[in-house]
Amino acid sequence: MLVVYRFAVTEGETESFSRDAEDALAALASCGGYARGGLGRALDDFDAADEVWMLWTEWDDVGSYRRSLSNFQVKMATPLLSRALPEASGFEVLAECAPGGTPYRTDSDREADPEAARREAAR
């Protein structure tokens, strides 16, 4: 599972934002199922007033990511995460490709019946 949070950051808050984002990344990295992650800034600005930053993480599965959101340290990073742009952030990986390799597909973990998934999660 891949999670991508994007942020609009003004030039004056770059230092404090990057420190807070690194703290959030460390909190997420301390959780079970975390595979890797990083923080980046867009190279292109398109004459925008704010820079676009991205905090991304990879997880073993959706359950690991969702459980991480209950972690105390991650909750302390909530003010930063709540600043993310209002767009989809969680993605299931459906194809991968190693350097020089051939892409290979993976099956979806999505439940065909969303209500069944909700009932299962509530148990």
Image (cartoon, rainbow, N blue to C red):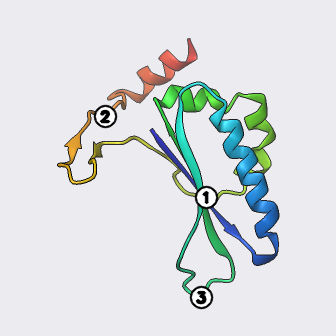
Residue sitting at 77 percent across and 34 percent down? 73
Q: Residue furthest left?
A: 102
Query: Which type of secondary structure does the marked residue at label 1 adopt?
Result: loop
Left or right of 10 in this view: 95: left
**Residue 34 image offset from top left, x and y in percent:** 55, 32
Q: Residue furthest bottom?
A: 47
Amino acid at the residue labelled 2:
Ser
Query: Would you identify the image quadrant in which residue 113 lies?
Result: top left
Dot label at residue 101: none
**Residue 71 image offset from top left, x and y in percent:** 72, 28
**Residue 42 image offset from top left, x and y in percent:** 56, 71
**98 or 46: nearer the eye?**
98
Disc 3 to disc 2, C-alpha distance? 38 Å
Residue sitting at 72 percent across and 53 percent down? 21
Left or right of 68 in this view: 78: right
Q: Residue furthest front?
A: 100
> Quick one: label 3, few (<14), some, or many (20+) residues within 10 Å?
few
